[in-house]
Amino acid sequence: MVFLADFVAGGLFMYSFVNDYSEGAHERIIEALTATNRVQTCGYGLDEYCNEARAILAALLQRDSDIHFLVGGTQTNFTVISAVLRPHQGVLSAATGHINVHESGAVEATGHKVIILPSEDGKLRAADVRAAVSAHYADDSAEHMVQPGMVYISHPTELGTIYSKAELTELHEACAECGLPLFLDGARLGCALEAEGSDVTLADLAALTDVFYIGGTKMGALFGEALVINNPVLGRDFRYILKQHGGMLAKGRLLGIQFAELFRDGLYFRLARHAVETAQKLKRGIVACGCPLAVDTVTNQIFPIIDKEVLAALREDFAIGFWEKYDDKRDVVRLCTSWATEDSMAESFVEKLKSAMR
């Protein structure tokens, strides 16, 4: 059997650690889509496959939440945020939040400001929310500024860190006190749930957020995000808003089939666990080579600090994402593993790193 590592070693192929959506989809999803290809259904997410997926997810959520299926994360973020906020309001986010740094101003394009808060580890905490709201209303000219209207977080964060159940509980309570809905971006949710030390479940998220979504695009699906609205007030007329924002897929069945397959028997969690375990194996190898970490993470994203000359050698065989300049001689890079990353590729990367550092 020929493995990807053989192609890398032979100079025939450059393996990518740039992101966690370089591959297509898990084989079971392709098989399910093929097997149902000729079946006729109604459109717009009201078909039997979407209903089956909703029922499977509802059992895991242990809550009668409103579930919708969208195609991608950015689309889900700006649709939800614009649906929740009134015209004069903005959304609180960590400065590193995806809606602030990697969505081409999608939220702003809907007429709403992303109000950024500093964060060392990518997380927002209860004290951050209370302080931001207090500062706004303590200002005599508050009504001349954008009013905080909701809170956005991601789990895991853009830095690969995760929230504990205690942190989410405190944040949920602070948001409730301040009258701000809490929205959790779960594009890589599986990796947070399966990370070592995680004590958060899907049922916890249903209880501790007003709205969140379960990412499929980065978790073994071809595409797709399952949006879970736990606050019934926010679900009112949501399908109208979904349609208006281009998020209502005519062939919605394609999303339902994928999520039913991912969650039917725990495939989603197994794929996420593989991504996390491969990343942690890669991290241990990199640290053993003497490379420090800009931030220590327990998910599928790694942020090592590597000498630029060593990076040049690594990039002969591997695609590596630049994160930020560390100093004149070193850069912080991001390495991502996925549900499909082979252990052999992590091993090949570490061997190449060892060789380049000699």
Image (cartoon, helix red, strand yellow):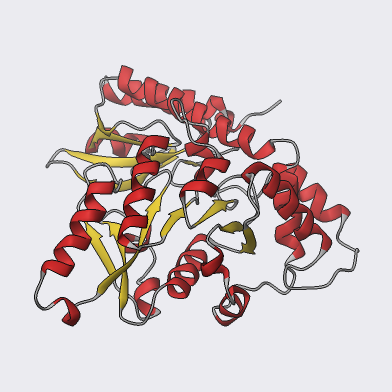
Rendering coords of residue 236 (x, y %): 57, 73
In this image, 192 relative to 256: left or right?
left
| Residue placed most toward the observer, 353 or 62 | 62
Q: Residue at x 66, y 42 (%)?
A: 60
Q: Nearer the viewer, residue 107 or 222?
A: 107
Q: Is residue 130 left or right of residue 315?
A: left
Above/below status of 185 relative to 85? above
Residue plotted at (12% across, 42% down): 328
Image coords of residue 131 (percent x, y): 18, 55
178 or 330, which lies in front? 178
Using residue 88 as the reference point, say whether residue 5 is left or right of it.
right
**Where does residue 172 sit, x and y in percent of width and height?**
39, 49
Furthest toward the top, the residue is 288
Number of callouts in the render? 0
- Residue at horizontal 58%, vertical 53%? 217
Residue 102 occupies quadrant: bottom left
Q: Please, is residue 299 above or below residue 175 in the view?
A: above
Position in image of residue 329 (x %, y %): 15, 38
Toward the right, the furthest residue is 39
Relative height, residue 245 to residue 173 (above, below) = below
In the image, is 28 to the left or to the right of 215?
A: right
Q: Quadrant of residue 38?
A: bottom right
**Where is the N terminus found, in terms of image quarters?**
top right
Quarter containing the C terminus: top left
Task: Identify the residue at the far front of this view.
Answer: 177
State the residue at coordinates (64%, 63%): 68
